[in-house]
Every structure is written in C-alpha cells, then in structure tokens.
Image (spheres, rainbow, N blue to C red):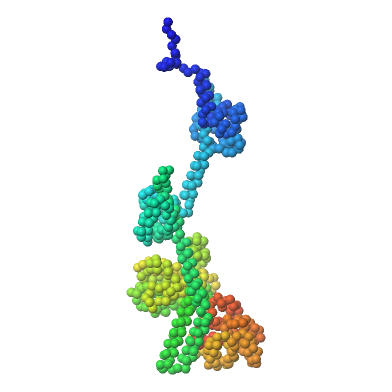
Amino acid sequence: MEGKRNRAGPGGGGRIDSAIAAETFRALIHDAPLSIVAFDASGIIQLWNPAAERMFGWTAEEALGKPHPIVSEEKQEEFRALREVALKGKTFTGIQVRRRRKDGSPIDISVSTSPLRAADGTITGIMSIITDVTERKKSEETLLRLATAVEQSAEIILITDPSGAIEYVNPAFERITGYHRDEVLGKNPRIMKSGMQDHSFYEELWKTLTRGDVWSGVFQNLRKDGTLYEEEAVISPVRDAGGEVINYVAVKRDVTNERRVEEQLRQAQKMEAVGRLAGGIAHDFNNLLTAITGYADLLLMDLPEGELAHREVLEIRKAGDRAASLTRQLLAFSRRQVLQPKVLDLNQVVTDMEKLLRRLIGENIELVTSLADDLGHVRADPGQIEQVIVNLAVNARDAMPNGGRLLLETSKMEIDESYANRHDPVLPGSYVILAVTDTGVGMDEPTMSRLFEPFFTTKEVGKGTGLGLATVYGIVKQSGGYIWAYSEVGRGTTFKVLLPGEEEVAELAEKEVAYLYPSGGEETVLVVEDEKLVRDLVREILSQHGYDVLEASRGTEALEVSGRHKGPIHLLVSDVVMPGMTGPELARRLTALRPEMGVLFMSGYTDDAILHHGVFEHGAEFLQKPFKASALGAKVRKVLDAHSHETG
C-alpha cells in the first residue's frame, strides 16, 4: 500500500500552516529592532511592539486601544493628515516628524507607513515602522550649523587637498580676494602670491605642514585687482580615521586695516614723543632766539649796509631765523604750535600764492590750478595753510628734477557714514579738499609707509631735514583735517588734504605791518618778563622807539611798580608763564586798577600751555617768541592805537 505523501515536502509546493504563519509573524513583530505600530481607521492603536515600548516609554497595556500617545496636542492635525493619506491606499517612506516620549522629551522619528487591508481588500487601518533619528538629526543640524557658520564667517576659510589644490573657499574669500570660487577651485593658493615673501618663507611653511604640525603666520598677498593685502593665517592638517592627512584647512583674517591703524598709532606716538621734546625745549630755546635775533636787529639798525660788520650781523640774523623756523616745524608736526585760525576761502589762498609758487618750482615745471566754484570755506590759520601748500609744492618740485606738471585742485565733498567707515579715522561731514598732484618719480610702498615720519627723508645728506611732510601732517591734523598720499613709482604722486567745511563767511585778510622801523610813541609801557635777557632786549627796543619803559621780573613786582608809578600806564607787555603769578592773572588785576591800560602777551611756550593759561579768552593780542624787533614795535603800536580808540 502506497504511503501518504508529505505535501509540504521538498518540491511539493504545499502551503504553510496558517497557525504557524501567524506565530511567525507575531515573533517577527515582537523581536523586531524597529518600532512597529498599527492603528485602526479612527487612529486607535491595535499593535504596539516591545521596540515601541523601549523607544517611547509606554507599555503595550498603556497604549493598546487608545489614541496614539506619542502625538502631542499641537501635532494632532499633522498626524490626522498623514493618516488620511495612508487610509486612501498610499504608502509613504522616510517621513521625518517630531513626536514625544512618555517623559515628555522630544524625539525625532522617521516613519514608513502603509495601509492594512482585509481579505476582500478593504483598508481597515495603517501600520507604521518607526526609526529613532534623534541623534542623526542632531548630527545633521550640527553639520548644517557648521556649514552655515563657515559660509557666513567673516574670516576666509580655504580647504585644499594634500597637494595644495583648492577644494573649497567660503564667500569671505570671494569678498576679500575678489576671486570667484569657480576661478580658484583646483588651483594652488600661490595664484595670490605677491612676491613680497621669499622662497624660504614658503619652504618653512610646507616643512611645518608635512610634519603634521599647525602653521601660523602672516601672508602678504594680492587681490584679483592687483592690490596688496595682509592676512593672518592658521593652516591645519585634517586626518582621516587612519591618521592620514586628507586635507589642509586654512583660516585667514584680513588685517590690512588693522596694520594701517597700528602704523598710524606708532607714527602718532613717535610724533608725540618728539613733540613733547620740542614743547619742552621750546620755551627756553625761543627765549634765547628772541635775544639773538632781537639784538641782531638792533645792531643792523645802527650799522651801514655796506660794512663788513653789517653783513656778518645779517648772517647771525639769518641763522637765528633758520633756527626759529626749525623750532616752528618741530612744533607744527607735533601739533603744539600756536594757531590763530580764521575763516578762509581756500581758492583765494591758492590764487594769492600762485606767483610765489611759480618762482618756487622753477620754469621747467608747469603750474596748473583747477579751483571748484562755490567751494565754501574752512577755519584754519592762514599762515599754516600757506606753509602746507609751500611744503607740498617743494616736495613735488624735488620729485620732478627734469621738469613736469604740478596741479593744484580744490573741491568739496560730503562724507557719509559708509565712506567714513572705509577711511578710518575720518568722521562724516562736509569737507573742502585740496589736492596737489605731480608727474614726478613717485614712491614705492616702503617709502609711502614712512612718508609722514619725522626726520625721514629720501634726499641726500644736507638737502633735507625730513620735517617738511611731517610738518604738513601736523598742521592738517591740528586744523581738524586729514591727509592722504597716493603714489606709483614712475607715475607721480597726489596728496589730498581734507579740511572741515565752515559755514561762516571768510574774514578779510588783515594786512600786517611789514617794515623794519615801525613808528614809535611816547606812551608808558610796563614790561614783565622773568628772563632777564629777553626783558633787557624788550626794554631796549621799546626805548629806542621812544616809549617810557617800566620793568619787572614777575607779577608781584609788577604790582608794586604799578603802585609806585603816579602817571598812566598805557600798555602791559607780559610773558604768559612766570613764577608765582601768570601773565593773564597779572593782567586781570592790573586792568581792574588801570582800565586805560592795554595788554600784549608774549611767550615761547607751545599752544597747549598758552591755551591752558587763558590767553585768548578775552581776545588779547599775542606775540610768539622769537620775534623780530620790528614785529614787537609794530605790535605794540597796534595795541596802543586800538586801545586808545576803544577808550576814546
């Protein structure tokens, strides 16, 4: 009798028992590492495997037969919309949503959902397979933040392969260098080399990197447009899990402006140091020069012009003038000279100086002026502005030994916040501009960097003090302005002076009395000066002009002299800074007793000291030491005449 066949045997094509299949399905769901959750059509949970318990914290007893607990109130509408999509027979995979655990903490999940069908094909619910992607999401967000930070960084970030070929640059690279990333990808950073760093510099850089160390230093590189910029850089090797270098990453910062500001600070500190020295010696030095030049003037008055003695004394006088000029330059560039600013028409100043400038620069240089209409005015010391123009013209002349063209231009400009930010330390406002341009030899970068440095000169020994441009710088700064130079070797130089605009109408130029023998008088003058050498000189000059001179060495003595003198004292000529009592204090006390008395101050001190003692508070006249005998005589006469007119 033939035995029964095993219908499930090999090659038998039999069916698996349904009970076995159900048990197998339950085991798969129970042991699955992924959360598996099933819902009916209304969203009530029908299946909640152990992985779901571990992932979300609710047990099967807590979840089954209830609405989905992981969906917070504010996410219910989102959950309903997704459920409705699945109930329409659609399957979706890898939908990422945020849900919650039993303890209330958030969890990011990836959900793949498909419809559940009955035997007749009717959709009865949905089943979701859920993966916890919280950590992956954090990593992605971290990478995104990192990428965003790199893209938005103000510093250049550049990545190369091990051979140095560029693989990535951020937008800061494009902004600072002028190169688009497509122009540099695959190329070596050497395309930006300026030639200012030698082979050994780059050799040391690569030695450091190939050792696996981090390199840091400063590059002098060129932008796409050829302009030089300076950048601090840190270059680090990037290694894979096996320790092999797979990339180099460079973080660079453009420090061009910082270096310029630092250089300006160093320059200012140098000038401040020399200025303090100049200010410290100015008083004593000017007193000595006052005596030297003053007595030389007195001798010249008495000596016939043709005599040898007259010529020799004249040389003494000239030497004294040169010494006085040197002192003024020292005080000018250190911004310590006494300024007497007025509202000026800069066009008029340039026009008035044309004849002088043509003689100064010589016939082989063409002088051209281009003056803007409706220029406006500036407030400055006219003598100092003239000195600025003369110094710049002389500088231009020396740069054109074979002739050329000197152009003086004026214009006006409104500087806004944006422009001011790009041209530190300029402040926003209205400015009048003087540009002095030559077609001379020009200057290289090292010369430009020291242009306004005191005692720096490119001229031969004995042909330049190095104070000309330093003086210009000091005058411009003390006048509240700014100065820049633009130059190229072989193509000439332009200096631009910016002076703050002034709304007031320009004052009429006052004609100075310029003669050697000013008219004298018979009035009584009280001279108060603690330096005997200067006091004797002033007494001698005024006596020769016919004045009756009283003298005192200090304020207390002057009060006593005034008290003893029975007649009027028409003028007080006083030093500003004296032991015990200052000149202004003495003037206040004496004019209270003698209202008919005029006041003339004199001093060898600098602007700071004069202003500190309130010399100009009441419009008093002032004479800066050293002075000529004629200047003293003219000033005394001017003050006496003006005061006599005021008092009737």
Q: Looking at the rendering, in which quadrant would you find the C terminus?
A: bottom right
Q: Is residue 330 above or below residue 110?
A: below
- In this view, the residue farthest toward the left is 402
Residue 372 is situated, as x and y percent measured from the top left of the image, at 45, 70
Residue drawn where x is 45% and y is 56% of the image: 253
Whether residue 643 is situated above or below residue 381 in the rendered picture: below
* Left or right of 48, for residue 195: left
Report the residue at 44% width, 71% height from top: 453
Q: Position of residue 159 (x, y in %)?
A: 41, 49
Judging depth in this view, the residue of 639 and 53 nearest the camera is 53
- Foreground residue among 588 and 521: 588
Residue 236 point in image, percent of width and height: 43, 51
- Taking the spot 44% from the left edge, 10% from the top edge, the residue there is 4
The quarter of the picture where the N terminus appears is top left
Q: Left or right of 612: which side holds 385? A: left
Residue 356 percent coordinates (x, y): 42, 79
